[in-house]
Amino acid sequence: QSVLTQPPSASGTPGQRVTISCSGSSSNIGSNPVNWYQQLPGTAPKVLIYANDVRPSGVPDRFSGSKSGTAASLAISGLQSEDEAHYYCSAWDDSLTGSWVFGGGTKLTVL
Amino acid sequence: QVQLVQSGAEVKKPGSSVKVSCKASGGVFSSYAINWVRQAPGLGLEWMGGVIPFFGTANYAQKFQDRVTITADTSTNTVYMELSSLRSDDTALYYCGRGGLPAALNNWIDPWGQGTLVTVSS
């Protein structure tokens, strides 16, 4: 059972816009920035969005992130076949001594 | 650009320990956190702990507090993760990943190592 809640799957056709939600609590998303990671099949995760809405260099502007209260979302516009991957949200949780928590991951299928 | 290279796959017996290494090259080492995150087959990501080599003291997830030790060797730019009392459900890919900003654990994780498969089987 993951601390952050994501839908297990999402899908869209090429060119469509897809959003992936991530729900947490006051000790994690409610008080810390959210990061999103993309994991392509057979590879290590890579950061896609950090600090809620910042794209690292090299990440297309088709990807965007937002946060409100204890929830966050990742939007992908102009969906492409190479976007088919697992997406994980993550935030620092201030409980106890602090720890990273992750969502269970969303498998995005491009139809 | 910093690169993290991890040690090779391991096969271990239940009850034993495993030590995985993560060597950094091409960037600043000691002031950035190194985190350990594992991924069981077909499942999601789970943070185990992290260390900022300059400070040396590791921070562990409560779940692994009694079984994991993370250490850093600043002379070789290498961080180690040792997991003891292995069980079959510890079978997973173990990743190291660097913190996004110096001197803190809680910003983001990038880049990641290539992963080390640890298989626990009798």
Image (cartoon, coloured by chain):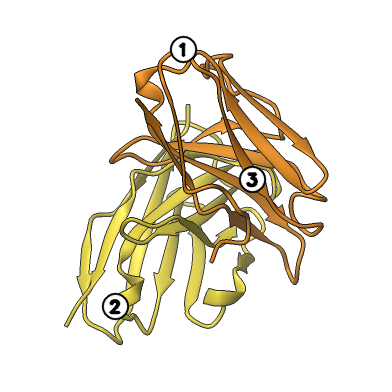
Chain colours: A orange, B yellow
Vertical position of residue A30 compared to residue B88: above or below: above
Callouts 3 and 1 close, C-beta under 8 Å: no
Amino acid type at image mark 2: Ser
Q: Quadrant of the C terminus of chain A?
A: top left
| Element at label 3 | strand
| Element at label 1 | loop
* Extreme-left residue of the structure: B122
- Chain designation of label 1: A
Note whether residue A34 is visible. yes
Closer to the camera, A77 or B10? Answer: A77
Front position among marks 1 and 2: 1
Front position among marks 3 and 2: 3
Residue ID for mark 1: A15
| Image location (x, y in percent) of residue A35 | 63, 39
Left or right: where A54 falls relative to A61:
right
Front position among marks 3 and 1: 1
Q: Residue at x 63, y 66 (%)?
A: B59
Vertical position of residue B116 compared to residue A58: above or below: below
How far is the residue under mark 3 from the one under mark 1?
23 Å
Residue ID for mark 2: B88
Amino acid type at image mark 1: Gly
Q: Residue at x 39, y 44 (%)?
A: B113
How far is the residue under mark 1 from the one under mark 2?
43 Å
Closer to the camera, A61 or B54? Answer: A61
- Chain designation of label 2: B
| Image location (x, y in percent) of residue B119 | 24, 68
